[in-house]
Amino acid sequence: MWDTRRDTGAVASVPMAISARSALLVALALVALAFTAFAWSHLRRARAGAPTPWMIAVGFVTNFFDTLGIGSYATTTTLWRARGTVDDRLLPGTLNVGHAWPTFAQAAIFLVSVRVGEGTLAALVGASVVGAWVGAGFAARLSKRRVRLAVGTGLAAAAALMAAGLLGALPVGGEALALEGVRLAIGAAACAIFGALMTFGIGAYAPIMITVALLGMNPTAAFPIMMGACAFLMPAANVRFLRAGACDPRAALGLTLGGVPGVLVAAWVVRSLPTTTLKVLVIAVASHAAWRLFADARQAEPEA
């Protein structure tokens, strides 16, 4: 499944490939270390007690499914609110801070273990990060309801196309591990948009998974791309949450302690799944994300 012989672009550019992957791993390590030092200094001053078994269990379950591409924020919020674990005011900060370390683990595991064209990996991760920063101001002026409806519609349509492909009605998806030319440009542009939309709280996992599949890549190649993008995006937001004290330290620590083992278990599952199963997973993820977006859009304030 991880054979790179079909990925001629990556094989032909071995020096660049090694440099790109190494650069991302080094940058990830530096970001993780810097964030850990900053977060520890703030959380230590909070002097909170140890997380409960429930908090740790939520971390394991939500990050297990997050590693499969399902996402963790909606599931964590649902479980926490069911038992009143975290004050609603602290939900955004606690989610981001607590899920940061599992996301670092996801990114490191998939950057090392999953074969993907290194130039493609660097371009799409970089585009996601640039999109989140450069596009944040523009995205903030858009209607959240309209964006949710548009993205939800796009995901639903893409999931339908992939389902038709699996049924033999349409040629969709593939085994490529790299993008070139126009497809690379389309993929980078799409990831930049997804990065910008993350400022709305719209997860990038499902859109990235569906995009790389529709561009003809092996769905597994989406994992290092989407995990890498989020690992670089989350720390900056978390600095603001921690400085404002907008985080429940016990619940955040519970997510971390349970989340990292959950990631390790799920990563083995992802690596062992055949391509067809992964494509079915992508369709399920995209359909679920579209449903959530439509539901959130219906709850939003009607526009004048």
Image (cartoon, rainbow, N blue to C red):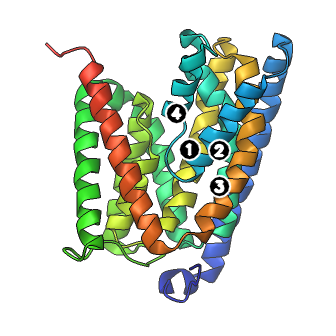
Mark 1 or mark 2: whose residue is earlier in sequence: 2
Badge 1: residue crowd in 10 Å (few <14, some 14–19, many ≥20): many
Residue 159 in the image, given as x and y percentages of width and height: 29, 56
Badge 4: residue crowd in 10 Å (few <14, some 14–19, many ≥20): some
Q: CA distance from mark 4 to mark 1?
A: 17 Å
Taking depth in this image into account, of 135 and 65 the one nearest to the observer is 65
Residue 162 in the image, given as x and y percentages of width and height: 29, 64
Mark 2 or mark 3: whose residue is earlier in sequence: 2
Labelled disc at residue 266: 3
Instruction: Give the residue at mark 1.
Output: 230
Dividing the picture into quarters, in which one does residue 98 lie? Answer: top right
Q: Secondary structure at mark 3?
A: helix
Labelled disc at residue 75: 4
Q: Secondary structure at mark 4?
A: helix
Residue 54 in the image, given as x and y percentages of width and height: 72, 26
Q: Secondary structure at mark 1?
A: helix
Badge 3: residue crowd in 10 Å (few <14, some 14–19, many ≥20): many
Tell whether label 2 touches label 1 (CB within 8 Å): yes
Amino acid, disc 4? Thr
